[in-house]
Amino acid sequence: MSERRGLRGYVTARGFGPYVIPVPVQSLALRDYCARKKFIYVLPANENCFPHSYLVLEGMIGDLSGYEGIVMCSMHMLPHRAERRRGVCHRVFEQGCSLHLVLEDFVVEEAELSTPFKEPIVPLSSIAQYRKDHAPGKRVHVTGIVTLQRLGEDFFLQDATGGLRVRTRQAETLAVGDRVEAVGFPDFEHFLTVLQDATFRKMSEPKVSVRPITVSTEELQEGLHHAAPVGHSVA
């Protein structure tokens, strides 16, 4: 078996998550990361610009026998859909390689092993915050009160710290005021946090009364009161 040498870079000209970073800057960041971590940096493959296309990434992971792993700027460069993202990660791990994510400063070396519903509960306002103890590509565990559901598409949660949109295809009807726990992959849409590809279940606590709040137009324009039930706004 040939010796594995270095990390293969992966860059893209399209935006990912909340970031839009020119390819030359991405490459510099990857090179710096490899220098600091004592890896050989292998010139990157550049993903095409078509939305939701990962042909270059799929080609890279087809044969990683000569490399120690893949280095990219962010977990948001991985496929959005959970099953596709898991497939990419498993194919990397099966070859004895790892994923290095520069902006999050994480190395992912194995698939998710624990049951996510047994993980600690994360406050909704903390979903977007950097947490050293949380590996990218791993689901997070949240709870909250349902404020709206669009069956088969998404629902919205509120807790004492804030709100969150939860995207899921799970076809179970929820009522406003139900207390729910959910696990999913944190992501960004339109600069707001969202939990992607989520699984949820109702909790045994009694339903909570949810009352709409009155807010100003300026607060809505600033993106405040995310996922909160709004009765009407005032100028």
Image: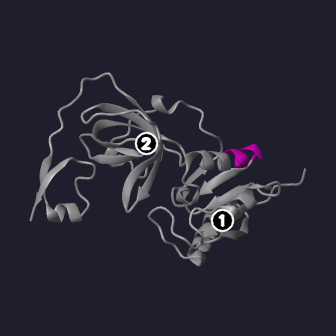
Q: Is residue 26 positioned above or below 228 on the image?
A: below
Is residue 91 magenta-colored? Answer: yes
Name the spot of residue 199 as percent of width and height, x first: 46, 36
Name the spot of residue 233 as percent of width and height, x first: 12, 58
The first of marks 1 and 2 along the sequence is 1
Q: Is residue 200 positioned above or below 8 on the image?
A: above
Horizontal side of residue 22 vs 109, given as left or right = left
Which residue is farthest top? 204
Mark 1, residue position: 10
Labels 1, 2: front one: 2
**As rendered, which of 145 and 186 lies closer to the eye?**
145
Tell me the kind of residue under disc 1: Tyr
Name the spot of residue 163 as percent of width and height, x first: 29, 47
Is residue 50 magenta-colored? Answer: no
How dense is the environment of label 1, judged by Cα within 10 Å: few (below 14), some, or many (20 and up)? many
Q: Is residue 168 positioned above or below 35 on the image?
A: above
Q: Quadrant of the C terminus?
A: bottom left
Horizontal side of residue 167 vs 225, given as left or right = right
Name the spot of residue 29 as percent of width and height, x first: 58, 69
Horizontal side of residue 38 vs 65, given as left or right = left
Q: Which residues are magenta?
A: 90-96
SS type, badge 1 = strand
- Image point 33% across, 47% down: which residue? 164
Magenta portion: prevailing SS class: helix
Tell me the kind of residue under disc 2: Gly
- Image point 77% across, 47% down: which residue? 95
Mark 2, residue position: 152
